[in-house]
Each structure stands twice: as C-alpha cells, then as structure tokens.
Amino acid sequence: MFFGNSEKKQKDLTAKNDAALPNSEVHNALDIWLTHRKANVMDKCRTDNAVHPNFVTKEPMRENGESALSSYLTDTTTVNSGRRIMTASKEMKKTPSSKPTKPPDHVTSRSSQTSSKQTTIAHEDIIIKRNPFNWTIVEKDFCTKRFPNTTILVVLHTAIEHYERRQIYRDMYGEQLYEQYGIAMLFVLGTSNNGDKKERILEESSTYHDIIQQDFLDAYRNLTWKALAWLRFVDEYCATARYVLKIDDDVVFDAIGLLKYLHIDERNSTEIKNENRIICGLFQGTSLVPVRKKGSKWYVTKEEYQPDFYYPYCRGIQFLLSPSTATAILNASIGEKFFWIDDYFITGYLGHKINVTFDNIRPLQATKEKFLERKALFWWVNKGDMREAKKLWNKLELSYEVEQAVKKALKESRQNCNGTSSTTIRPAPK
C-alpha cells in the first residue's frame, strides 16, 4: 500500500510479498538508513562538528558488499517534477462473491440471451452504425456516483478468461489509487458462447462492479468493437473524467510517475481536455505500411484496406486522451467501414479524420530496468507474466514510499535544528 500521513505507516513501509529482501532486513536497513540521513542533517547543526558515537555514518551493507537499500532507492531526477507526492494506504474494498439470483441493475436483460452477433467475428464489409452492439453489462454510475472525481479513467482491454490478470490489476491499482489521485480502473469485454464463462463474468462483475461488456464475440479480430464500446461508455457515462488511459492487460504503468508527467495537480498542467490530442508511443516510418504477407498475424487484404500506407498511429498497448477526443473519435467512426486493427483504426485512421495531434512518449515505453529506475512510464510484461509485473510494481511503489519517508525524516531533522520540533532521533541498533 502507499505511504500515508500516519507515523505508524513508516514502520510498515516494506510489508510487501517481495523476494528482493527479507522483510526484517528491509525494516532494519531502512531504519538505519533513515537514522543515518537524520544524523547527517544534525551534524550540520553542531558547532563542534562532533559525530555522536551512536549515529551510523555509513549506508547499511549486505555481507556481499551491496547496499541493502540499493534496489529500492532510485534516481528521482529523471522525473520532471519537483513537488512532493503524497500517497494513500487504504486497502481495496472487496465484496464477498455471491452468485446473483437475478440480473442486477448493471446487467441488462439481454445478457442472458444468445445473440447471433456473438457467434461470428464481425469484421468484413461492415459499415459502422451508432451503437452497433448492446450492453450486456454496464456500470452507468461508475463515474457519477462511485468515482465522481475521476482524474484518469483507466480502461483495460482484457480477454474473458483472464480472471487472474484482472485480480492482479485490482491488487496493484485498486481503489487506493482513486482515494489519493482519482484514478479509477475499468475492464472492457466482449461476450462468450460458453455458458460457464458467462456465469463467471456475471459473478465477477457483481463482486467488483468494474466490468463493462457488449454482445459481440470476445476475439482478437473484434478488438475494434471493444474499443468502440469503451469510447461509447466514456461518451455516455464518463465525460467528466479529465483523462482516459487505454492499456492492454499485459502492461504495467507507473501511476505516480504518470501523474507527475501530466503535472496533474499543478495549475500549469499538461491539459488536453479541449483539444484532439493523444499521448502515446507513436508508430512512424516503415511501420506505416500494411502487411500484405499471407500468414502474418497482421496480414491485411486489399479488400479490408485499400491504401498502401497507414497514417501515423499509436501503439495499441497504451494511449491517453481526453473524453472530448474520445467522443470525437466515436462520432467519426459512424459510416466508416470496419477495420479490425484497432490501434490503427482508432488512433490513426479516425485520428487523422478528426485532425489529432500526437505527443510521442515511445521512449517512456521501455525495459523493466528503466521502468524500475523511473525512466519509463510503461512496461510491456513479457509473456503476460503478471505475477512478475506485481513484484515489479511492489518494488516501484516501495521506492516512492522510501522517498517519502526520507523527505519526512529530513524535514523533521531540520525542524530539530531550528528548535521547532521535539522529535527524538532513535540511535541505530548496536
């Protein structure tokens, strides 16, 4: 959980299920290191430059000579922001799972019916109409009552069978992010012809109320329908959000770093609310050519897409836009021929149609190491290993917590120097 204002939380900073360091070692190392930093500040206050014998004057080390905190302390100068980031520490609320006896308010009556649209992958020679599919699950009050002060609505493209992935995302980015920063998370699904999967999704939705679903078959070639579904949801039910972040369910993002990048709480913020602008990792150059090689996953026929070029477009794993831009893209899709490559169709073809501008942050979509060093905002999880992703997020989260603990300790030490606080610095354990 995040570091909050309570003194008690400082003792619980490293309560993570992470194998990088044993919990006791992290606690001891952090206590010693903070005491050392306080001692350094206090030393500057002493007129005789004497060092108290109980103060530790070196960073705690492991037996192999490595710093005990080196994997948690990162270079904060890589993030273009100088303000203090405070975090919350409230556990995500979970409602005990229960099998619904009747469709709840967020589940439409159509969800129990079998639609002919579910049984096929609808992608060729179809002209997009307004509201081409029906809601089977929709959370109409998501942004008005449950999360009325949404800063960033995170929409995740996820497959029906990815139950564990969704739970890991809830554990990483659950309601605690909304409590402090106004970040709310929503999963977007198509439907299935499998009755057991349908029932399980209904139970999951009734438990967490963070799923929306329409009655098209959940399949790779229907990803454009999935994108149009959440664009419609934003237009109809979540236009009050400040930003919308679309990610796939194998992407980890630095939530705190993203807020700092957007200057979300500053008056001179990077505001995109009233213009057609998308922030993403941009495809350009040789990537702007349709794949005509049969057998390729991205093979495109002339019948599907006639031109021999693509407009610049976003990598589909992540892009961020305003609700007004989402509405503009949704409206621009009406009357267009359906195209199954969703990232190009949504951000490239329709983006070109409404004259979007792009902020290219592709360098901020980088390796795991750069992500952990806070030099990247997004990391694509190799082979969808979300357990590894959770460990990475725990480390990153802990680094922010340590940073806040250090800032707080230094502030208290300076107050001691000025005689404005009676806080006693605990001597290092012998």
Image: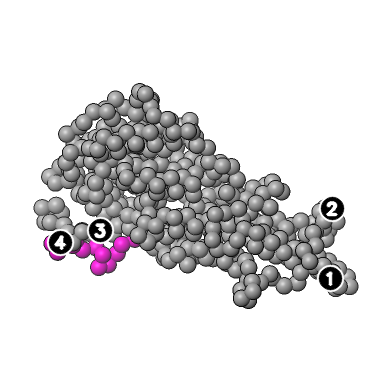
Corner quadrant of residue 200: top left
Which element is circle 4 on?
Answer: loop
Magenta region, residue range: 278-294
Cα separation, mark 3 vs mark 1, equals 67 Å
* Amino acid under disc 1: Pro
**Label 3, on which residue?**
311
Residue 300 pos. (x, y %): 16, 57
The residue sitting at 38% across, 33% down in the picture is 203
Within 10 angstroms of label 3, few (less than 14), some, or many (20 or more) residues?
some
Cα separation, mark 3 vs mark 2, equals 63 Å
- Counting residues from the start of the chain, the first of labels 4 and 3 encountered is 4
**Label 2, on which residue?**
422
Of marks 4 and 3, the one in the foreground: 4
**Label 4, on which residue?**
295
From the viewer's perspective, is residue 387 above or below residue 428?
Answer: above
Contact between labelled residues 2 and 1, with CB atoms less than 8 Å apart: no
**Which disc, if any, is residue 187?**
none
> Is 268 left or right of 320, judged from the image as shown?
right
Of marks 1 and 2, the one in the foreground: 1
The residue sitting at 27% across, 38% down in the picture is 191
Cα separation, mark 4 vs mark 3, equals 23 Å
Residue 59 pos. (x, y %): 69, 70
* Amino acid under disc 2: Ser
> Is 123 left or right of 72, judged from the image as shown?
left
The question of residue 287 being in magenta is answered with yes
